[in-house]
Amino acid sequence: MHTRPLQVKPRSETQEMLSVSPEFVGHHRRIEKARTLCFVNRTRQSLLLPPLRSSK
């Protein structure tokens, strides 16, 4: 394994990230939001719905 100097690596990575970021990051954030919403909805259903049904 070759140890690369730390100064060379970040530049190439940051350039690649900047070239990819606006589309890819937005898509990734949408997926994360959808997952979090699904998870929150599931937890709400598992926690809130049984007492509501029993209270009816």
Image (cartoon, rainbow, N blue to C red):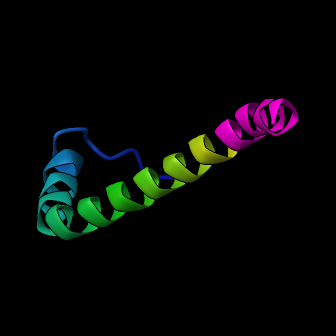
| The quadrant where residue 40 appears | top right
Would you place residue 18 above or below residue 7 in this image? below
Residue at coordinates 25% horizontally, 61% vertically from top-left?
26
The region drawn magenta spans 43-56
Q: Nearer the viewer, residue 24 or 50?
A: 50
Q: Position of residue 38 (x, y in %)?
A: 58, 53
Q: Position of residue 52 (x, y in %)?
A: 76, 34
| The quadrant where residue 25 appears | bottom left
Instruction: Tally the numbered discs.
Output: 0
Asked whether residue 39 is drawn in magenta, I would say no
Q: Position of residue 29 (x, y in %)?
A: 34, 54
**Residue 6 shown left or right of residue 35 in the figure:** left
Asked whether residue 44 is drawn in magenta, I would say yes
**Residue 25 shown left or right of residue 33 in the figure:** left
**Residue 7 shown left or right of residue 29 in the figure:** left
Residue at coordinates 82% horizontally, 40% vertically from top-left?
53
Q: Nearer the viewer, residue 2 or 23?
A: 23
Give the dominant element type of the magenta stretch: helix, strand or loop.
helix
Q: Nearer the viewer, residue 17 or 39?
A: 39
Farthest residue, direction right = 54
Farthest residue, direction front = 56
| The quadrant where residue 3 appears | top left
Q: Nearer the viewer, residue 51 or 21?
A: 51
Quadrant including the C terminus? top right
Would you place residue 24 above or below residue 2 in this image? below
Residue at coordinates 16% horizontally, 40% vertically from top-left?
7
